[in-house]
Structure formats: structure tokens, C-alpha cells
Image: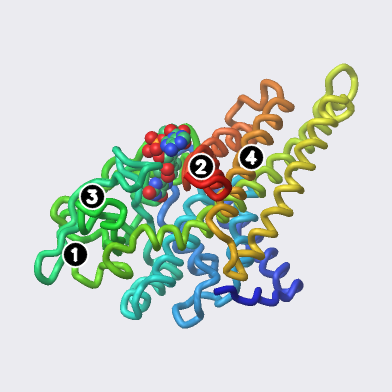
Amino acid sequence: MSAAAPVIDPAEFELFRDNVKRFLEKEIAPHYEKWEKESWMPREAWQKLGENGLLAVDQSEEYGGAGVSYPYAALVLEEVAKAGFCSLCTALSVHSDIVTPYVAHIGNAEQRAYWLPKLISGEAVGAIGMTEPGAGSDLAGIRSSAIKQGDHYVLNGSKTFISNGQHADLVIVAAKTDPAAGAKGVSLFLVDTTLPGFAKGKKLEKIGLHSQDTSELFFDNVKLPLNALLGEEGKGFAYMMQELPRERLNIAVQAVYASEGVLDDTIRYVTERKAFGAPLSQLQNTRFTLAQCKTEIECNKAFLNHCIDLYLESKLDVPKAAMIKLSTTELQGRVTDACLQMHGGYGYMVEYPVARAYVDARIQRIYGGASEIMKEVIARSLVGR
Ligand SMILES: Cc1cc2nc3c(=O)[nH]c(=O)nc-3n(C[C@H](O)[C@H](O)[C@H](O)COP(=O)(O)OP(=O)(O)OC[C@H]3O[C@@H](n4cnc5c(N)ncnc54)[C@H](O)[C@@H]3O)c2cc1C
């Protein structure tokens, strides 16, 4: 069913943007470099985000949210990405814009009352565990199982590449409740990470997104209460399909605004740096490259805004969401590469923001469904399987 798009007061919206920017300048910018070097964002950062009302802003006031619409949530991601804090952007996107909506949309009253206030205040950090060592793109192949035994489920298996895995207090885990039923046997569970048998593996070392913690998780006979089941048994895939458009929209927001941020930074650089007696910005190749990047960013932004409007009207379908993810993350790859090139050797030095933007961008074409999978989803909507 489609819904009417919410009315947004532009003055209020821009005031919120100023608040987010101020928070980033005061609470994130002074520490971000250190977090990236240490590959760790401390827990206090999550608490600060919560105290300042920047987690899951679009959740209901009943649970401590601001009760505003999705564009406010997207604004938080926009500003974080534009400032070049991509590790934080991914961490936030998973917590506020994937995990929290799953609980809000699919959870029952008891689950919402227990988890939402904690997620919104930053008392609890959320993660989502779909991927396993043997199943990424092909999620029907997951082997984790949750078998009902009387008044509980017994969860066994493992997950890998889980964002926020080290900090997580809540992990939404996809597991087979009926291993013989293929995709139809997959269910989702709200797993409290303090339960016996739940173990966090090592924090994985990555080429980018250093301070965004990514982990393996292990489940060894974890006894889950029946009320850990999220929604209905066997509907895990249907729920994932329902929530996927927003997940992909978040990645697209990050892609467009991270691209804009790195282009702005590059414009400053080429205006100051001289070669052959003039700023780099006077060279025709530099000018054309900047113009090309800006044009592509604006085109993608227009498509992104269109998709946000569709989402607000409950009309963003799976193929469109795949298109926006595909288009914007491929854009981010092109823009960061072109911007690095315009920096010359300095672009290869980690102390230059463009170097970080370049490596951070690379994963965007893989997680949340790789570009090849996006093309397959789109093709299916055109010509079937
Ligand atoms: C930093 C990071 C954070 C992540 N965060 C999370 C998280 O929070 N939660 C979570 O569950 N997962 C997470 N992931 C996992 C991520 O979603 C998967 O890595 C991704 O879906 C791809 O799965 P895979 O790595 O198993 O690759 P594979 O599925 O093995 O794919 C390998 C290659 O084959 C291609 N391929 C596969 N199938 C097809 C096909 N049918 N047609 C054409 N090409 C195909 C893929 O596109 C890819 O290029 C994260 C990964 C990383 C690296």
C-alpha cells in the first residue's frame, strides 16, 4: 500500500543539518584520525550520538526517537559521509537505518519496548548477521540453524563480516528453523549477545573503513527464548526483501555524499597546487574531470532524491533500489579514483583525505548486495530469470 510523503519544514530541516554538522565538528572530527589509526571507535562515541539524539532519528517518540521522517535519517548519513567519516557512516547506517527499522517494523510490542529505547539512546549497539563464510550473495545457502526445542530455540553456526560485531549488544541473526525447506526455512532472531554460547570472534582487518568494526560471530548451542523470534517462522527472506530497499537507499546516500565531499576537497587541492606555473585547476584535463564528476554526482543525486520520494510513498521496489545502489556506488568508485588521480602522488598518501575516501569507497560495490547481484536483480525485472 502506498503512503503520502511527509511534509518537511525546510527551515527546521536546515536547523537540524546545522546541529548535525556542529556535533561532527565538535565530537567526531577531533578524534576520527585516532580511531582510524587504532581501527576502533570507542563505545563513548555511540553514547554521545545517542545523547545528542542522532541515532535512529526517524523512530517514534514513544521509544525516545525524534519521530521525524526518513529524510532526517538520510541527512545524518549525508553529513557524516560528506565529512569523510565513512567508517562512522557505515556503522550508523547499520545501527540506525537497518537494525532499528527491522525491530520497529517486524518486532512485536514486547520486543519493540525492550530494544528500541536502548538502540535509540545508544545504550545498545545493533548489528545484522546474514553473511556466513560459505554464503554471501547466495543467502539461501546459510547453514546457521535455530531448532525449536520445547520452550526455546537452539542456535548454532557462525557469521562473518558483521558490521558493529564487536560492539553489538543485539544481533539480528538469519538462521534456518527448517533446514530442509531452503529459502522458505529461514527465520530471523533478535539475539542478545550476552547469552551463553554467543562468542565474538576476532575484529577483522580491512583495507579501508578501519574504525568500523567488522567481525566474525559464533553461536554454540545458544538457547534463545521463543520471543527472540522476529516476526514469523520461515518468513526471514520475505522480511529481508521488505527491508532491502531502505538498506540500499542508505548505501546510496553514503555513496553520493561521500563523492560530493571528496570532490569538494579535490577542488580545494587543485586550486592551490601549482604545476607549470599555474594552479592545476587551470589545466583543461583537470577542469573537464571536475566537470564530469560534478555532473555525474548531480545526476545521481536527482535519482537518489526520486528514490527517497518513492520510499516515503512506500513505492520503492526491489529493482529500483538495486538501480540506485548500483549507480551511486559505481559513481563513488569513479569519482574517488578520478579525485585521487588529480592529487598526484599526494593522493596515495594516507594523510590526504582522498586516499582514505578511495579505499573506503571500494566496499560499497560489494556489501548490501554486490554490483553483479544488483544487475541480476534489475535484469530479472526486465526479462525474468
Ligand atoms: C566491510 C564489510 C561489512 C559487511 N557488513 C555486513 C553485515 O553487517 N552483515 C552481513 O550480513 N554481511 C555483511 N557483509 C557481507 C557482504 O554483504 C558480503 O560480502 C557480500 O554480500 C558478498 O558476499 P561474499 O563476500 O560471500 O561474496 P560472494 O557471494 O562469494 O561473491 C563473490 C563474487 O561473485 C559475484 N557473484 C556471486 N553470485 C553471482 C551471480 N549470481 N551472478 C554474478 N556474479 C555473482 C559477486 O558479485 C562477487 O563479485 C559485509 C562485508 C564487508 C566486507
Q: Which amino acid type corresponds to the residue marked 4 in the rendered image?
A: Gln
Residue 226: x, y in percent? 20, 70
Disc 3: which residue: 144
Crowdedness of circle 1 by 10 Å Cα count: few (<14), some, many (20+)? many
Question: 66 or 253: nearer the eye?
Answer: 253
Label 2: element kind: helix
Question: Furthest residue to the top?
Answer: 276
Q: Which amino acid type corresponds to the residue marked 1 in the rendered image?
A: Leu
Disc 4: which residue: 332
Question: Cα distance, mark 3 to mark 1?
Answer: 14 Å
Question: Furthest residue to the left?
Answer: 150
Crowdedness of circle 3 by 10 Å Cα count: few (<14), some, many (20+)? many
Q: Which amino acid type corresponds to the residue marked 3 in the rendered image?
A: Ser
Q: Which amino acid type corresponds to the residue marked 2 in the rendered image?
A: Glu
- Is ligand 1 within 8 Å of the beta carbon of the residue shown at mark 2? yes
Question: 22 or 157: nearer the eye?
Answer: 157
Q: Is residue 103 above or below residue 237?
A: below
Residue 129: x, y in percent? 34, 52
Disc 2 + disc 3, Cβ < 8 Å: no
Residue 284: x, y in percent? 88, 25
Disc 1: which residue: 224
Question: Cα distance, mark 2 to mark 3?
Answer: 26 Å
Q: Nearer the viewer, mark 3 or mark 1?
A: 3
Query: Which callout, 3 or 1, points at the residue further toward the start of the chain?
Result: 3
Tell me where residue 69 sits by quadrant. Answer: bottom right
Tell me where residue 106 sits by quadrant. Answer: bottom left
**Which residue is depicted at the point 53% across and 53% down?**
248
Q: Nearer the viewer, mark 2 or mark 3?
A: 2
**Which residue is depicted at the point 40% across and 63% down?**
239
Label 4: element kind: helix
Label 1: element kind: strand
